[in-house]
Image (cartoon, grey):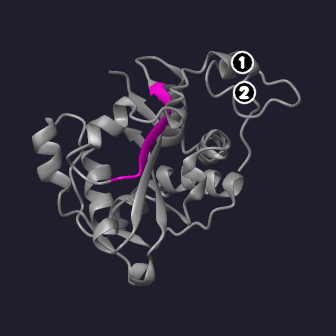
Amino acid sequence: MLYPRLCGGCRRDLYTGENYVCTHCLLEMPFTHYHQMPDNPLERMFRGRIPVYGVTSLLFFNRGGIARQLLHRVKYFGDTQTAVAMGRLLGVALRDSPFSECGAVVPVPLHPSRQRTRGFNQSSLIAQGVHEVMGIPFHDDWLQRVEATESQTRKSREARWANVATAFSVGASVSGCAGRVLLIDDVLTTGATLEAAARVLIAAGAGVMLATLACSNR
Ligand SMILES: [Zn+2]
């Protein structure tokens, strides 16, 4: 599918050499740089909840900000190429960091019924971009969503956890996994979804690192 050559952030025409976002928006992107920051606020968020080797997010998810606009384009306009492009940007950031030591890139899955309705899983597209740049094998069958959960957006942290706690299981192919897994999701808010997904990978013997495209600014 072809999309007009417009910036995914400000919708201005793109120049030759610009892809998906214009140079101005790229420079204005609210990068967290958390992948270079041990003990960053996201790692502290997971401390005491699950043992993970690292947590990062590429961008702050500000109201009206570019991360929000780009993910909105993916979700509601089906702009899958932008999701892959944003994943590549995340991969470039993580290439020279401890996250590059992972042996597998695994997206947080959607329930099959939700994926059928939407036609794609944006976390999977982001993970494909990460895989392309970092050269780490991509496995979208290692995690399965076995329960269709309600939307998390209006729920409290406790309610979010109750909603997703038993939503995931590992696929049959993960049984020999002993290395580190880079678990990818689109947005990190309370961490309930990532925690539930990471728990089943850890129970299967994997060491887990978490990376998302955006995180809520706190
Ligand atoms: Zn722009």
| Residue 12: assigned label | 1
Residue 30, percent across and down? 54, 20
Q: Inspect the image, locate mark 2, and give the three-letter code of the amino acid beneath it.
A: Leu
From the viewer's perspective, is residue 192 above or below residue 6? below
In the depicted view, which residue is nearer to us: 114 or 198? 198
Would you say the magenta stretch is mainly helix, strand or loop? strand
Asked if the beta carbon under badge 1 is closer than 8 A to the nearest atom of ligand 1, the reply is yes
Q: Residue at x 54, y 29 (%)?
A: 33
Q: Residue furthest right?
A: 16
Q: Is residue 137 magenta?
A: no
Residue 76, percent across and down? 47, 39
Query: Which residue in the structure is indicated by mark 2?
Result: 6
Residue 95 lies left or right of residue 19; in this view the side is: left
Quadrant of res 178: bottom left
| Residue 163: assigned label | none
Is residue 145 visible in the rendered image? The answer is no
Residue 200 lies left or right of residue 187; in this view the side is: left
Image quarter in which the C terminus is found: top left
Q: Residue at x 52, y 69 (%)?
A: 139
Quadrant of res 94: top right
Residue 81, percent across and down? 65, 46
Q: Are marks 2 and 1 in contact (CB under 8 Å)?
A: yes
Q: Inspect the image, locate mark 1, and give the three-letter code of the amino acid beneath it.
A: Arg
Residue 152 lies left or right of residue 198; in this view the side is: left
- As helix, strand or loop, the secondary structure at mark 2 comes to loop
